[in-house]
Image (cartoon, rainbow, N blue to C red):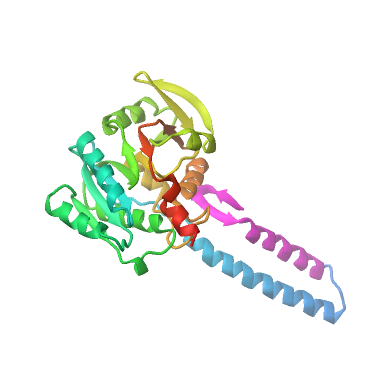
């Protein structure tokens, strides 16, 4: 459990409990016992508590959200799509084809998280053919868990050198049904008063049940569900949001504090920022997602 304080500092509840114990022990000594053994025992307890608190403070430093302000966010910037993959040569072909067909003017960055199949060779070939604009190829041993958080951070740092208007990230097993970038910008403008700053465009019955709807609105004749959390399969936002939520955590594992959608959802809630959800796609890899493949090892 975590407690959220101003400026997005998330403090483990265990640390607060230790502070309370430390306070109570100190009070008991203050009001005094003359028994040396008890005093010595209390002193040892305080020493142990202090060491535990120091450990929590060290881990807390990793969880403090630091604004990521490197993007030049202008209306005339480019729309970048980030695609993550590993060992999905056949599936990623379809996703890339959808992106290029539906949003031909969008720029495409693909991050490979250490594929051992023919995916890297395919990406290099697509780079040569100028289908892909940028590619990052990682060795498996260089990618910590949760791997998607690592590749998101890589992508954001690389693209911060560009002039960017919108950012979309996608899993490699998404099939997209319709253009989304212009519509996303209309959503952000229409729902500004609702503080909707992120869109989740993969919203089937499973995800709709997991991420509860707060409110339903209509924009351009389309139903948009406003939610407090999201899944990370198909996400759109403007780079200015990163000034609030920063980069994702690296090396925290497949945990609620280490996976991008769980982690970012909590930050959005802490900052009273909402998600707009609509169904623009189909997730074809539910039974073989990277997260499931990793947790089954």
| Place of residue 24 in the rendered image (x, y in percent of width and height, measured from the top left) | 77, 63
The one of 281 and 91 positioned closer to us in this rendering: 91
Residue farthest to the top? 221
The one of 59 and 30 positioned closer to us in this rendering: 59
Residue ID at (78%, 65%): 27
Q: Is residue 290 visible?
A: yes
Side (left or right) of 5 relative to 108: right
Q: Read off the magenta span.
A: 1-30
Residue ID at (24%, 50%): 109
| Total numbered badges shown on the rendered structure | 0
Residue farthest to the left? 129
Q: Where 63 falls versus 94 (above or below)? A: below
Residue ID at (26%, 30%): 182
The one of 180 and 228 positioned closer to us in this rendering: 180
| Place of residue 178 in the rendered image (x, y in percent of width and height, measured from the top left) | 29, 30
Q: Quadrant of residue 155?
A: bottom left
For the stretch drawn in magenta, the main secondary structure is helix
Tell me, yes or no, whether the highlighted magenta stretch contains residue 192: no
Tell me, yes or no, whether the highlighted magenta stretch contains residue 22: yes
The one of 247 and 144 positioned closer to us in this rendering: 144
| Place of residue 77 in the rendered image (x, y in percent of width and height, measured from the top left) | 21, 40
Side (left or right) of 210 relative to 202: right
Side (left or right) of 183 relative to 100: right
């Amino acid at each position: 459990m975590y407690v959220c304080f101003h400026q997005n500092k998330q403090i483990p509840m265990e640390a607060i409990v230790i502070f309370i114990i430390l306070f109570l022990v100190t009070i008991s000594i203050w009001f005094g016992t003359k028994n040396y053994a008890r005093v010595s025992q209390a002193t040892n307890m305080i020493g142990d508590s202090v060491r535990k608190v120091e450990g929590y403070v060290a881990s807390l430093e990793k969880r403090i959200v630091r604004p990521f302000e490197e993007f030049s966010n202008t209306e005339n910037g480019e729309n970048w799509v980030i695609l993550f993959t590993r060992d999905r040569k056949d599936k990623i072909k379809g996703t890339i084809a959808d992106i290029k067909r539906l949003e031909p003017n969008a720029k495409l960055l693909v991050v490979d998280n250490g594929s051992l199949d023919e995916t890297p060779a395919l990406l290099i070939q697509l780079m040569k053919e100028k289908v892909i604009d940028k590619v990052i190829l990682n060795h498996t041993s260089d990618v910590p868990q949760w791997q998607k958080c690592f590749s998101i951070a890589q992508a954001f740092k690389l693209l911060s050198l560009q002039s960017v208007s919108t950012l979309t990230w996608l899993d490699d097993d998404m099939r997209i049904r319709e253009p989304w970038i212009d519509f996303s910008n209309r959503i952000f403008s229409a729902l500004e008063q609702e503080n909707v700053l992120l869109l989740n465009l993969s919203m089937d019955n499973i995800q709709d049940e997991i991420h509860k709807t707060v409110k339903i609105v209509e924009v351009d004749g389309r139903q948009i569900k406003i939610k407090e959390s999201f899944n990370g399969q198909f996400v759109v936002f403007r780079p200015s949001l990163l000034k609030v939520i920063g980069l994702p955590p690296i090396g925290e594992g497949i945990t609620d504090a280490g996976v991008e959608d769980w982690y970012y959802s909590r930050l959005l809630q802490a900052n009273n920022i909402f998600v707009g959800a609509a169904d623009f796609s189909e997730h074809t890899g539910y039974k073989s997602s990277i997260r499931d493949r990793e947790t089954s090892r």
